[in-house]
Image (cartoon, grey):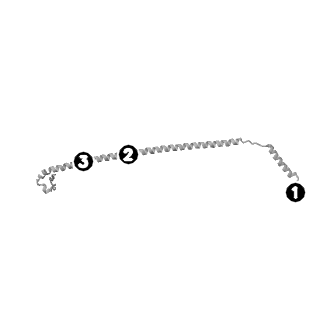
Amino acid sequence: MAANWSMSKPIAPKKTVENSDSDDDDDDDDDSEAGKDLWGAAKKEAASSKAREADRKALDAKIQAETERTKKQRIADANAQAEQMRLKRLEEEEKEARLREEQEREAEAARKAARQAAIANVQNVEQTVDLDLQRDIMKQYEQNFMDKEFGGGASPSSDFGF
């Protein structure tokens, strides 16, 4: 087990304006390989980050599209169900209206039949007079009248208080 003692160079502090005038470019050559490794790793990380971001956006768009499709489907189903309920309610109302009309027709027919029966009953009544009974009643009346006026009662003058 050998230990890896190779250490990368520490990053040099940024050059200030005063240090930038000097032509000390030799540390660029020493850092070029380590810088390339860091730069390559950063590029790879940026590329993978962009790829992950693109995948995430595509997934979000797919989820949103699926949500929107589901929402539209639910709205369409709800509208279809509402239309079915409306048609069913209209059908029931029409059925009830027909039933009421039928009952009204039956009631009107029953009223007309009862009226016709009453008219027929009145027209079937015959006026009959029992003449023998009428004669007997008249004889009794006349007899009672004659008995009071001519018959054996008090004198006619007594009627006036004399």
Residue 62, image x, y percentages: 32, 45
Residue corresponding to mark 2:
70
Q: Residue at x 33, y 46 (%)?
A: 63
Counting other residues with Cα less than 10 Å from the Cα at mark 2, is it few (<14), some (14-19), or many (20 or more)?
Answer: few
Amino acid type of the residue that numbered disc 3 sits on in the rendered structure:
Ser
For label 3, the SS is helix
Residue 81: numbered disc: none
Residue 96, image x, y percentages: 54, 44
Amino acid type of the residue that numbered disc 2 sits on in the rendered structure:
Thr
Amino acid type of the residue that numbered disc 1 sits on in the rendered structure:
Ser
Say whether disc 2 or disc 3 marks the residue closer to the N-terminus. Answer: 3
Q: CA distance from mark 2 to mark 3?
A: 32 Å
Residue at far bottom of view? 162
Counting other residues with Cα less than 10 Å from the Cα at mark 1, is it few (<14), some (14-19), or many (20 or more)?
Answer: few
Q: Nearer the viewer, residue 2 or 110?
A: 2
Q: Quadrant of residue 113?
A: top right
Residue 48: numbered disc: 3
Residue corresponding to mark 1:
158
Q: CA distance from mark 3 to mark 1?
A: 152 Å
Q: Quadrant of residue 18?
A: bottom left
Q: Nearer the viewer, residue 18 or 71?
A: 71
For label 2, the SS is helix
- Is 23 left, or right, of 162 in this rendering? left
Say whether disc 3 or disc 1 marks the residue closer to the N-terminus. Answer: 3
For label 1, the SS is helix
Say whether disc 2 or disc 1 marks the residue closer to the N-terminus. Answer: 2
